[in-house]
Image: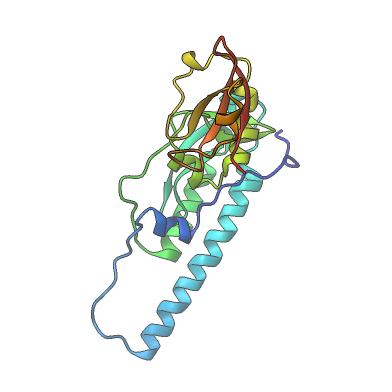
């Protein structure tokens, strides 16, 4: 049995995410009556309530883990999210979730969504791997400090040259260069600072304040 008391995974797959990923619902250009408008509003509210309920269920119940191999990426559904990161033993439970969301929320789609290529188990929860694109990590609700905390065990002590770190997410900073360490990111303010020693080994992960 998996540990259901582990910290919740911060997966932010909601209607707001749907908009951020250009989730486009099929709507009519025809004039609507007040009754039709009220019905549509009621459907939208029911969809939002269901999405919030299913997000919490997936977070709390379906993506607990013990080891990396417990975790998988499964196809999602709009507007709940383009993918789910769950324990592989729970994958079949997603079918009923997808059916219920599709029935309640109606048709919509994501425009060319990205999917994680790797997943890890950290603190009894499944996460995307450390080298996924920034859009994926931000999609599931990570900010710089959370990313640094989640992946420091995966990265600290390793040579950065061997990791092929995503330059859109990480920036390499020599530990001896205090001025550079303390300076803001010249390109992207949200990147994680990877502090390395003279031999290229990662000493710490840090963020701009």
Residue 114 or residue 41, whichever sits in front: 114
Q: Quadrant of the N terminus?
A: top right
Residue 7 or residue 186, whichever sits in front: 186
The correct choice, above or below, for 19 with respect to 92 in the image is below
The correct choice, above or below, for 76 with respect to 197 in the image is below
Q: Residue at x 38, y 40 (%)?
A: 114
Can residue 87 be seen at all in this image of the molecule? no
On screen, residue 166 versus residue 93, left or right, reads left
> Where on the picture, by quarter, is residue 49?
bottom right
The correct choice, above or below, for 141 with respect to 71 in the image is below
Instruction: Indicate the position of residue 101 as horizontal and vertical percent values.
Output: 46, 59
On screen, residue 131 versus residue 202, left or right, reads left
> Where on the picture, by quarter, is residue 3?
top right
> Where on the picture, by quarter, is residue 180?
top right
Residue lying farthest top? 199
Can residue 42 be seen at all in this image of the molecule? yes
Judging from the image, the colouring scheme is rainbow
């Amino acid at each position: 049995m998996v540990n259901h008391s582990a910290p919740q995974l911060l997966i932010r797959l909601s209607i707001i995410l749907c908009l951020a990923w250009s989730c486009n619902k099929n709507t009519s250009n025809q004039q609507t009556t007040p009754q039709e408008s009220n019905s549509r509003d009621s459907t939208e509210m029911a969809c939002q309530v269901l999405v919030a309920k299913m997000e919490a269920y997936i977070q709390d119940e379906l993506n607990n883990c013990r080891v990396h191999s417990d975790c998988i990426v499964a196809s999602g559904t709009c507007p709940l999210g383009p993918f789910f990161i769950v324990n592989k033993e729970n994958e079949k439970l997603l079918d009923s979730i997808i059916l219920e969301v599709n029935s309640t929320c109606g048709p919509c789609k994501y425009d060319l969504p990205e999917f994680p290529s790797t997943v890890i188990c950290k603190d009894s929860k499944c996460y995307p791997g450390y080298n996924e694109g920034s859009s994926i990590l931000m999609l599931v609700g990570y900010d710089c400090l959370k990313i640094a905390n989640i992946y420091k065990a995966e990265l600290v002590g390793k040579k950065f040259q061997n990791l092929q770190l995503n330059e859109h997410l990480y920036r390499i900073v020599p530990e001896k260069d205090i001025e550079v360490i303390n300076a803001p990111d010249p390109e992207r303010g949200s990147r994680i600072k990877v502090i390395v020693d003279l031999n290229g080994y990662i000493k710490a992960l840090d963020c701009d304040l």
